[in-house]
Image (tube, rainbow, N blue to C red):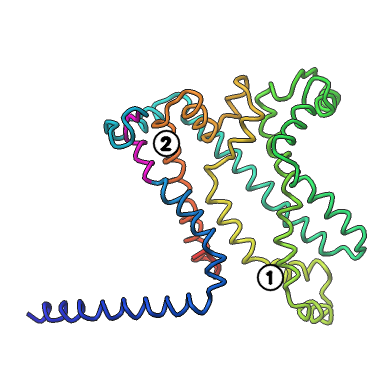
Amino acid sequence: MKANIQNTAGSRENPGRLRAWFLMAAKDISKNKALYAIAIPGILFYILFHYAPMYGVTIAFKDYSQAWGIMGSPWIGLEHFKTFFGSIYAWQIIRNTLLINLYVLLICFPMPIILALLLNELRNQSFKKVVQTVTYLPHFISLVVMCGMIVSFVSPSGMITQLVNFLTGKNYVNLLHEAKFFRPIYIISQLWKNIGWNSIIYLAAISGLDMELYEAAQVDGAKKLRQLWHITLPGIAPTIIILLIMQIGTMMTVGADKIILLYNPVIYETADVISSHVYRKGLVENNPSYSAAVGLFNSVVNCILVYSANWFSRKVSETSLW
């Protein structure tokens, strides 16, 4: 009887709380009309291109046919997942994806931090601007153009191929026809394209540090290395942690565009990743259900990774995404 009275009272209170929340939201919208107007395109983008298409994920569990549509296609459960994991190429694709992302994490993630720290120590402003410009420019090169440059450099008469042949004493015809060279080419080109652009975030974080801390450290006799270790790095640590969590959250994702523009069947053993596999199966071989199943598995693993990284960061530090 007492529980029923409490439930009745709670049901009466909830409409009041809901009405109060709506009133507060309406008041806030009325007060900040310009901010909400600016946010509308971003909100619509995520609704239309991220949340609305999630209904289509159901084709991963169906034998989808364009003639029958999503609703009319027969339900087959986990058959596509079984087909993928039963394939002899499944673990090779997963391994390639993880290895490329691991190399990007170990090499391409810390290098912009190092570049930002070095640029921050430069006192010659003219030289600093030149270095920044040279390192930023590759980011603005189209991916198609960049991949065309790479293909040209590693061709039989390419500069990089000739250099590798000179250093190793061998006679490679085309480095993109050698499976062992694909990952180094991918990582080095990724670093070259993004190192300057990614360093902007860390330079901005460094510029926001309190200069009085450095002055106090100088009074105490701390040299540049100690100032870097005890002031600069702890000061930008929250930025590093947030970006690291986001990077870990994409450990199962490698952009299909660059892979497809560079790889070929000869080097599938090291170059084929989940995104390129999804592209071939979904568009080239016209098997959207299987492609959706592999893509869904990829997204679930990424979600688990970002939640795990965020949980670990929250446990060991005071910084996390949520």
Residue drawn at point x = 44 percent, y = 32 percent: 291
**x then y, percent, for residue 191:** 72, 44
Q: Quadrant of residue 130?
A: bottom right
Q: Nearer the viewer, residue 181 or 22?
A: 22
The prevailing secondary structure element of the residues shown in magenta is: helix
From the viewer's perspective, is residue 265 above or below residue 119?
Answer: above
Tell me residue 30's x, y (percent).
48, 77
Image height check: is 96 above or below 205?
Answer: above
Residue 64 located within the stretch drawn in magenta: yes
SS at circle 1: helix
Q: Amino acid at mark 2?
A: Ala
Question: Which residue is under mark 2?
Answer: 292
Asked if residue 243 lies left or right of residue 124, the reply is left
Q: In the visual, does 276 lie left or right of 140?
A: left
Q: Residue at x 83, y 78 (%)?
A: 218
Q: Looking at the image, which residue is at 36% across and 30% down?
A: 80
The x, y position of residue 138, in whole percent, is 77, 45
Local packing at callout 1 (Cα closer than 10 Å; few below 14, some 14-19, many 20+) is: some
Residue visible at 40% across and 30% down in the picture: 290
Front residue of 7 and 300 = 7
**Quadrant in the picture for residue 119:** bottom right
Magenta stretch, residue numbers: 55-65
Q: Say whether residue 78 is left or right of residue 179.
A: left
* Amino acid type, callout 1: Gly
Residue 209 shown left or right of residue 20 in the figure: right
Q: Which element carries disc 2, helix, strand or loop? A: helix
Mark 1 or mark 2, which is nearer the start of the sequence? 1
Give yes or no for contact between labels 2 and 1 (Cβ–Cβ under 8 Å): no
Label 2 CA crowd tier, 10 Å (few <14, some 14–19, many 20+): many
Residue ID for mark 1: 235
Nearer mark to the viewer, of 2 and 1: 2
Given residues 119 and 47, the one toward you in this image is 47
